[in-house]
Image (spheres, rainbow, N blue to C red):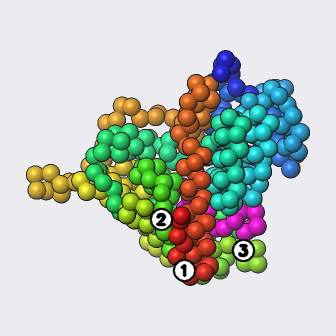
Amino acid sequence: MEKKILNVAVIGCGGIANSKHMPGLKTVKEAKMVAFCDIIEERAEKAKKEFGTPDAKVYTDYKELLKDQSIDVVHICTPNRSHSFITIDSLRAGKHVMVEKPMAKTAEEAREMVKVAKETGMKLTVGYQNRCRPESVYLKKEVMEKGVLGEVYYAKALAIRRRATPTWGVFLNEYEQGGGPLIDIGTHALDLTLYMMDNYEPKMVLGTSYKKLNNPKCGNVWGEWDPKQHKVEDSAFGFIVMKNGATINLESSWALNIVDPIEASTVLCGTKAGAQIKNKELILNYDKDDKLVEEKPISDYEGTIKQASAGAEAQQWIDAILNDTDPCVLPEQACVVSEILEAIYKSAETGAPVYFD
């Protein structure tokens, strides 16, 4: 692109926009936020005041926003149900799109988003910011791409909370979100694991899901919820076999009786060594001179991204558009994540494994 500054619009000015997207974009000098849209106008007005240019526009109808030909990029931060059709409309309006995770409520919708991105030639990416954390960058560039672990044949994708059920927005609404912790935080852990393994060919999935802890008086860190409004699972688990024989165990929960909660974590076991991201720390394990060794190498890594993950995510995305390169998260990769999540839900419902073609 010839432009050096991109005009960005944000559709959906709720929690994730305020906590990640808009603060991240604010750190990118090559981007300016010129439009904000929300069905609650006051939220869009607030976002304009905090993050927008003085002449930024406010909308309550995203279709009106998309008519503005000066807008180059759209960030979609709405509930999962609307990810697909807002993304498709934005791509067809000639906008590059970052859509918040998960890519879509259903795998079919995700596949259609990939198709339209290819048809329009516009760039599409998904908000899996954990790939941009320093320990993730190091693990990918300095460990996985250099074959340090050897063949990775077993992995864990972990997103387990003890008592942290989100009680705001539409997190508990199955119609709007498509599920609970699996599609909310399990999606991050699965994406990170597949990315590190560079393996996007699932063969079979067996899943289970549970709704066992629907007692709002349970010490939840975000307070009580209305049990009648809690329409999603509180835990879901998946056993994933890849076409090359590798196995991934996916564990996700908002509320589980467990001593050590862990989130956005991946465990990778290879033929030469192993690795784990735990509490934003990278730990390598291997044998040396017939002794078992653990190493935490990230502190010595000079090439890592120094920004917080939100700013790093926004920077690489804007750079990809300006330089016409691939963003960190490819839509085809995010689509496979959605396909596996959907297969876990289907298997949990039917009690049978789900096989991929």
Compared to residue 293, the image places residue 31 above or below, namely above
Residue count near mark 3 (Cα–Cα under 10 Å), binned few <14, some 14–19, many ≥20: some
Q: Main secondary structure of the magenta part?
A: helix
Q: Earlier in the sequence, mark 3 or mark 2?
A: 2
Query: Was residue 175 drawn as part of the magenta stretch in this picture?
Result: yes
Residue 315 percent location from the top left of the image: 58, 32
Nearer to us: label 3 or label 2 = 2
Nearer to us: label 3 or label 1 = 1
At x 88%, y 45%, the residue is 61
Res. 95 mark: none
At x 80%, y 26%, the residue is 70
Q: Which residue is mark 3?
A: 231
Magenta span of residues = 173-189
Q: Is residue 256 visible?
A: no
Quadrant for the C terminus in the image: bottom right
Give the SS element for disc 3: loop
Compared to residue 57, the image places residue 183 above or below, namely below
Residue type highlighted by circle 1:
Ala
Q: Is residue 38 left or right of residue 193?
A: right
Q: Which residue is mark 1?
A: 352
Q: Which residue is mark 2?
A: 203
Q: CA distance from mark 3 to mark 1?
A: 23 Å
Q: CA distance from mark 3 to mark 2?
A: 30 Å
Give the SS element for disc 2: strand
Q: Nearer the viewer, residue 13 or 180?
A: 180
Residue type highlighted by circle 3:
Lys
Residue 53 percent location from the top left of the image: 78, 27
